[in-house]
Structure formats: C-alpha cells, structure tokens
Image: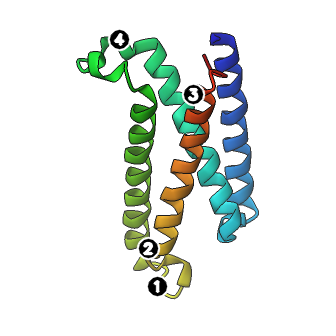
Amino acid sequence: MEKKLNNLLLITTTLVIVLFSAGVYYDFLALSWYDEILHFLCGAWGALIIFYLYRKYGSKLPFYSKLKEKPAVFMVLAMLIIGLGWELFELILVQSLKSVYDHSPNLQPNYFDTFTDLIMDMAGAYLVVFKYRLKLLD
C-alpha cells in the first residue's frame, strides 16, 4: 500500500510541476481549460498528500478519534481550505500587481474563475476519495 501511494504521489507531483511550468513558460495559464485541468490535478495531488499525512501522522492529531471514522470528509475539507487559501493568495497577488500592470484585463478579480477553480479542486479531491472508497488506495 505504501509503495503504491508513494508512486502515485511521485507521478502526480511530477505532472503538477511539468504542467505548471509549461503553463507559465508557454502562457497556457491564460487558457481556461488548462487552468481547470491544473486545478483538478492539484486537487487530487493535495488530497493524496493529505491522505498520505493522515495515514502516517493522523493518530497523533487531538481529534483523531472523531476523524478516523470519516477520513474522506477530512481529505475533502482540508482540500477546500487549501483551495480557499490559494484563491486568497491569487486575489492578493492580483491586487498587488494591479498598480504595476493596470492595463491588463487578466488582473481583474474574476469570481466565476475563482468558483470554477474551487469546484475543480474539489473534483480532484473527490477522485481520490472515490478511489479510497473503492479501496484502491488501501
């Protein structure tokens, strides 16, 4: 199980790094579908990391007795918090760059994009939860 999870983490980490780097270098991030694919993949990647940390260190958490019954809920909620943090980071970044690049339409707050990003993060996390429920990660 551990080897399977480690291999899956290595593959998804490599994919995230390669796709994000290509998106930055070739300006693919301006394409909405590319951004959605990255958010889906990052949602799955984040949930895998949370699952890995939960299996390794979860028993040390003070609320583990309640958590051990519903690890899937924990993975999705933790991914939601991470996704909200990332979107807040993007908003702060856009606002700070707005004074420098005020003419760029890409630097306007876009709440539909934020909502779509969070949905795709959750969809990626649900993929991991679905695999966990099918016992493919166990």
Q: Quadrant of the N terminus?
A: top right
> Residue at position x 58%, y 26% from top?
132
Amino acid type indicated by mark 2: Tyr
Vertical placement of residue 46 versus 51, above or below:
below
Which residue corresponds to mark 2?
111
Would residue 59 appear left or right of 18 to someone viewing this image?
left
Q: Nearer the viewer, mark 1 or mark 2?
A: 2
User: Considering the numbered disc 4 on the image, is that residue within a helix, a strand or a loop?
Assistant: helix
Vertical placement of residue 89 versus 100, above or below:
above
Would residue 53 appear left or right of 19 to someone viewing this image?
left
- Residue nearest the observer in this picture, 71 or 2: 71
> Residue at position x 57%, y 49% from top?
123
> Residue at position x 56%, y 30% from top?
48
Which residue corresponds to mark 3?
133
Amino acid type indicated by mark 1: Asp
Q: Nearer the viewer, mark 4 or mark 1?
A: 4
Q: Residues within 10 Å of mark 1 (few under 14, many from 20)?
A: few
Q: Which mark is residue 102?
A: 1
Amino acid type indicated by mark 4: Ser
Label 3, label 4: how many angstroms apart (C-alpha)?
Answer: 20 Å
Which residue corresponds to mark 4?
59
Label 2, label 4: how many angstroms apart (C-alpha)?
Answer: 38 Å
Residue 99 placement: quadrant: bottom left
User: Considering the numbered disc 2 on the image, is that residue within a helix, a strand or a loop?
Assistant: helix
Vertical placement of residue 41 versus 128, above or below:
below
Q: Position of residue 119 (x, y in %)?
A: 51, 57
